[in-house]
Amino acid sequence: MYKPNFEVATQLLFGLYTIRHFLESFQLSMSEKHELMRRLQMNFKKEFNADAATNKGLDTQYRKREVEITAELLGKTDLPFEVLTPFIETKISEIALLSSNIKSQLEIPLFDFLSSHIHMMVNRQFTSRQRQYELLIYDHLYRFYKTQELRRY
């Protein structure tokens, strides 16, 4: 399959994009997405022994790209990886058609299933430092969904 050589910022946006669509294919509510990302980012912060400096670095990274991340996650931007969107949309549509059947047959909690698949997606996307990118992606998605949750009220 075609894999262009993207810069890291574009790869991060691509990861956010694919995870967002994957979660939407399972019809998760905003609060469910927020809770899933809260759990994932907390687990990774524990793994990395995240301290105040780590959290400050993550905050700085997010704030530096917040406008771009928000625009992408709300579907209000042209994507730098537009050539891949037809493939992604086809795959997500196929997953959406199967999602209710998958959910009804799961023998593990839905969040565990989704976490496992998201983990595999990220690990296939990045060729090195996958765990660090997972932390960054989960943190950014958590912040985005938290903001969206707060705006609902």
Image: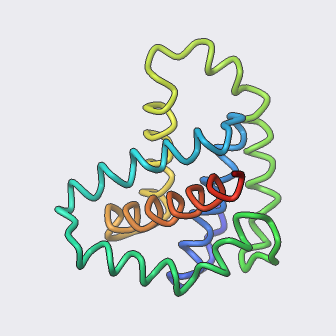
| Residue 65 rendering spot, x and y as whole percentages | 57, 82
**Residue sitting at x 32%, y 61%:** 131
Task: Tell which residue pokes out farthest to the front in this image.
Answer: 153
| Quadrant holding the N terminus | bottom right
Name the foreground residue: 147 vs 129: 147
Report the side of 110 relative to 46 (left or right). right
**Residue sitting at x 43%, y 49%:** 38
| Residue 57 rendering spot, x and y as whole percentages | 34, 81
Report the side of 32 relative to 118 (left or right). right
| Residue 132 rendering spot, x and y as whole percentages | 33, 67
Report the side of 100 relative to 39 (left or right). right
Name the foreground residue: 29 vs 130: 29
Name the foreground residue: 152 vs 105: 152
Give the quarter of the image for residue 80.
Answer: bottom right
**Residue sitting at x 27%, y 59%:** 45
Task: Tell which residue pokes out farthest to the left in this image.
Answer: 49
| Residue 47 rendering spot, x and y as whole percentages | 21, 55
Give the quarter of the image for residue 148.
Answer: bottom right
**Number of numbered markers:** 0
Give the quarter of the image for residue 147.
Answer: bottom right
